[in-house]
Amino acid sequence: MAEAMMNAAGRAAGFDTLLGAMLSGGDADAVRDAKTLIDDARPEDLVVAVDAAVARGVPLDALKPAVSRLVNLLATPLKRHRREPPPGERLFSSLMAENEALLAALDRGKTLAKAINDATAPIATRTGTIVDLRDLIEEVGAIETHYRKKENVLFPWFEARYPEFRCVRLMWEIHDDARRGLKDVSRLLDAALAGRDGATLDPAPLNKAIGRLYFDLNANAFREDYALFPVMMDLVSPADDERLFAETLEYGWALLDDDSIARFHGAEAGAAATAFVAAGPAPLRRTADAGTDAGALGFSGRTGSIPGEALAAMFAALPVDMTYVDANDEVRWFSDSPHRIFPRSPAIIGRDVRNCHPGASVGRVVAIVDAFRRGEKDREAFWITMKDRFIHIEYFALRGPGGEYLGVLEASQDLTELRALSGERRLAD
């Protein structure tokens, strides 16, 4: 194992072997033989090992428990390599503050989760505990904002600059697990309160759901603070850090109170950020920023013409989310409506469409794009209910004058009000 520590390739092979042992259920001999390597584990070792497993096609459902075992094994050395953002830095500082707030909320919930198992408590007391726990779960649900910032700002930036980026696919899967867990716990609590007392509560399924949710939320927070964020901090220049931070502001804040938010917004924070940027860039490990295509759109001929600023205003005014994916399956444009249904960030430009979706839906997206490319289909539609809103999502194949494939247009629209229309409303009325 000493030789494996001599170079990056050797370390990668060593941790790949170790993760393979975890996939087999945990091999005590492999762990014992790798003790020296384990004791020297770094954030990039975990990131690279997970990337290699995803790249060779290990199913994510099998990988999740194996990586959890590996993280437990590496927890102590990873904590030794925790990185604190430099003074004035705001991107990772704010995200880590959100994690800290999440963990504090989860800690408060432990007492409530324990109390619901007290069958000797008066019904009124038990009901109050359930209400308090439901309120806390609603508070914790704000972590959705944190996850959206990662999925739409951090992940695409990371994918463009770090060859071993595929660990974020597994992380996205755990985001979705946590989302499902929040819904499951809320549903069980609502069911317990349906009879307006705690007597209807069966604590067993709720205990299981809460345990799973706590595990997923803690797993994400730990892997961010001790693996993903430390690796990214070595890649992000101060200027990019501030730009990405500005993009995250479009999504809001997760679990932070007004005083905490002010730390990243006030005049003092702005001055510190200016000093941070002035300190100079950090080295990049891979490529420069993915740029946008030069040139501008123009229309003329028998249908008239539209100035560029009017065209941009038109896309912003239309109540439709639009995203264009080119013939190489890379995102090239999205409409910038102030009322988007699905969030988008400038960091998504140049991103492979396969990386823009959680694992559960990637296969379906790829199948649609491939059918469009082969000319077998020209459109595909889906509809979902999201927060009591009826959302229609449609994909269109784009083709040139000679039928050549140009890419895909995704158009999403909230049809809730339109579905409720009846009768007529005329201009003359």
Image: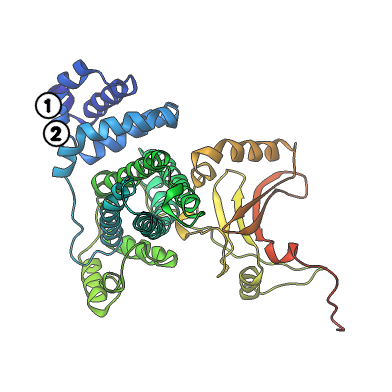
If the image is split into quadrants, where does the N terminus sit? top left
What's the mark number on residue 162?
none
Residue 254 against residue 173 in the figure, above or below: below
Q: Circle 1 is placed at which residue position? A: 36
- Residue situated furthest bottom in the rendering: 429
Front position in the image: 172 or 42: 172
* Left or right for 314, reference 20: right
Front position in the image: 92 or 211: 211
Badge 1 element: helix
Instruction: Name which quarter of the figure residue 296 lies in.
Output: bottom right
Q: Residue at x 23, y 45 (%)?
A: 226
Badge 2 element: loop
* Residue type highlighted by circle 2: Asp
Label 1 with label 2: CB-CB less than 8 Å:
yes
Q: Residue at x 29, y 20 (%)?
A: 21
10 Å crowding of disc 1: few (<14), some (14-19), many (20+): some
Front position in the image: 135 or 258: 135
Spatial distance from mark 1 to mark 2, Cα to Cα?
Answer: 7 Å
Q: How is the image coloured?
A: rainbow
What's the mark number on residue 40?
2
